[in-house]
Image (spheres, rainbow, N blue to C red):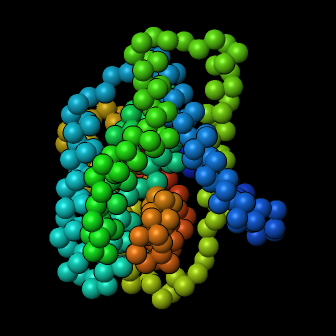
Amino acid sequence: MTSFLIALGAITPFMIYLGFGYLARVIGLAEEPFLNKLNTVVFKCFFPFLMFWNLYNVDGGLHVDGKYLAICVGSLLLLILVLCLTVPRLVKDRDKQSVIIQAAYRSNFVLFGIPMAESLVGSKGAALATVTVAIIVPLYNAIAVILFEHYRGGDVNLPRLVLNVLKNPLIMGALIGLAFLLLGIHLPGPLEKPVHAFSDLTTPLAMFVLGGTLHFSAIRANRRYIWPVLGFKLLLLPLLATLVSALLDLSSAERVVLLIMSGAPVAVSSYTMAANMGGDGELAGQYVFISTVVSLFTLFLFFYTYHATGFIA
């Protein structure tokens, strides 16, 4: 019963935030243009505070195992290689190939990873997730740009790509937070309190926006592309991550973060990128919506199993 309640406690806030946003749009309290603008504000203004605070606020210093980071990066690159070799053989439409590959590898790790890791394994879990995000999200972005340019026959502008990664608000927030942590810099009380408050606002507000922008549309027409890919992403990949965690004897925090990285829903930004870079935007949007809903249940099952079996302390 304790394991059930812990897993339920990790998932329930996300269900409430999403449902509240969806309801607000349906009854006309929040229109979609407003939500889209608010989404930009959350990304550029609030997420940097979340990334900063999760590193700045680590007790006892931050210790990240190089083996763990190598596993995260190596598994991501191997996954993308396998997808690039197999998906074009199975799907002939080029505008769907790029969308399917991105949906399979690119998780909404920022929005789900940090708060869920904190809920399950505390502040050190949140800090580890933040460091992982700072490394993995630039890879997500860079690979997605290369992927879409390739499948639509364009060229990749490498200097612009590097500059965009460095200008990413998430990366900037994480780097500043890491600098404060390593240099032992402490904010004055009157500044620390609002920074903490802005950090706390980020997850509920971002999930509210996500819930308000989810749509049911044309799912039946794309079902042969949707369910196999989401079964692979939300069930098979987390199972493989669990196996790797056990074989390599990762810590509880590392196991949780690797699980969320593997089994979180498709990133919201994947829809925007597909719609603007020659991919099938409708299919990308369906991946975001359905995976967000289904992952609440699949992640709950994994969290419950992890805790019930003692896989995490």
x then y, percent, for residue 197:
68, 30
Is residue 119 visible to us here? Answer: no
> Vertically, is 142 above or below 281?
above
Q: Nearer the viewer, residue 306 or 268?
A: 268
Question: Going 66% across and 33% down the picture, which residue do you hit?
Answer: 198
> Vertically, is 42 above or below 294?
above
Question: Going 82% across and 62% down the picture, which residue do you hit?
Answer: 29
Q: Nearer the viewer, residue 24 or 2?
A: 24
Furthest toward the bottom, the residue is: 221
> Vertically, is 49 above or below 18?
above
Which quadrant of the view contains residue 230?
A: bottom left
Question: Going 31% across and 67% down the picture, which residue do you hit?
Answer: 149
x then y, percent, for residue 47:
56, 40
x then y, percent, for residue 271:
48, 67
Quick one: quadrant of the N terminus?
top right
Is residue 58 visible to us here? Answer: yes
Q: Nearer the viewer, residue 35 or 110?
A: 35
Q: Nearer the viewer, residue 157 or 31?
A: 157
Question: Going 69% across and 59% down the picture, which residue do you hit?
Answer: 35
Quick one: quadrant of the C terminus?
top left
